[in-house]
Amino acid sequence: MSSRFSPIFITGPTASGKSAVAVRVAEALGGEIVNVDAFQLYAGMDLLTAKPSAEEQQRVPHHLYGVLPLTETCDAQRYRDLALPVMADIAARGRVPLIVGGSGLYLKALSHGLAPLPPADPELRARLALMTADEKRTQLLHLDPDAAQNVPLANPRYVDRALEVCLLTGQPQSKLRQTFAGTPPAGPGVLIEWPRELLYQRIDQRVHAMVQAGLLEEVAHLPAVSATAEKAIGLRDIRAHLAGQVSLAEAIAAMQQATRQYAKRQITWFRRESWLQTICLDSQSTAECALPQILSHLSCPPQTSLP
């Protein structure tokens, strides 16, 4: 891939305004957006996963949104296999690939590649499913005392995978990951941050906006989903309401809380990625006012004149 058209990474916690900022950056640089959100890959969950709006998608080309059926599973390796040809095609046409989203492991798969780790083992995962979260964390730290430095221990999915790697290889997963720790990123990147209180307000407001836009109807019409897709935040909460198990207010509150917890885990993940340049936004910020700061961090002259 030509260095002139090497990818640019735009990431941050959920509800941080990545989509709007990325569209403006794409317009300024002559770029096209490639999704790096694990759940926005799926078709049929546009509201639930807060996909870019139709207006945003009309302004610049967007790729890898809604490309997987809900019945299929996905992981970082499959995502990388999907994304690399798309990025190469964008660059070959003289455009800039903008990798946009908040799934840290998927982003890392493109920015630094994947460590040579063993594939998932269904039999082992079935055994791990019988253990409590505390038991798995304790065993992981026993097998790999350094795991706390590179595994979000509050995230069961990452703990399961790290423990699986330790058990399958007989080695600490942190040692295996060091094989590519010194790899430079494939391109520059920015991390969009907000004061925690303001970010949580944005999350709460967005959940209400989702409901008003038809979230209940969207979820009601979803078919059976894969083990990956069913982890989409809010899916279980809205389904519980539709089944008459909880009130709408309770479902909204649970979805808001789960989203805030997810944002907290994302913030912890991205703070370890020292190659990302932090862009701090606040209640007065817009995509327009953030653009010059982002371009300055990226050291990219715009291809179009800024307003």
Image (cartoon, rainbow, N blue to C red):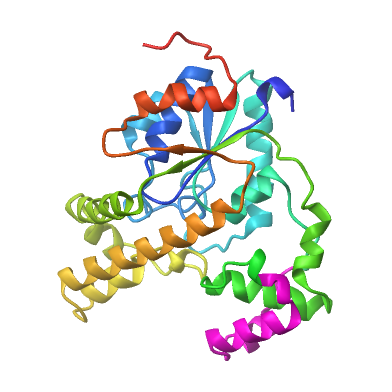
Q: Is residue 303 left or right of residue 140?
A: left
Give residue 57's quadrant in the image. top left
What percent of the width, then of the height, locates residue 290?
40, 28
Q: Position of residue 275 (x, y in %)?
A: 64, 41
Quadrant where the N terminus sits is: top right
Is residue 79 found inside the magenta-colored segment of the image? no
Vertical placement of residue 291 versus 140, above or below: above
Q: Which quadrant of the figure contains the C terminus?
A: top left
Above or below, 94 against 10 in this view is above
In this view, the residue in front, 214 or 201, is: 201
Q: Residue furthest top?
A: 305
Q: How many marks?
A: 0
Extent of the magenta region? 119-147
Residue sitting at 62 percent across and 76 percent down?
A: 160
Residue 140 appears at what percent x and percent y?
68, 80
Q: Is residue 125 above or below residue 147?
A: below
In the rendered structure, the answer to whether residue 266 lies left or right of residue 5 reads left
Q: Residue at x 36, y 29 (%)?
A: 287
Q: Residue at x 60, y 21 (%)?
A: 299
Q: Position of residue 29 (x, y in %)?
A: 53, 19
- Residue at (33, 35) in percent of width and height: 54
Q: Main secondary structure of the magenta part?
A: helix
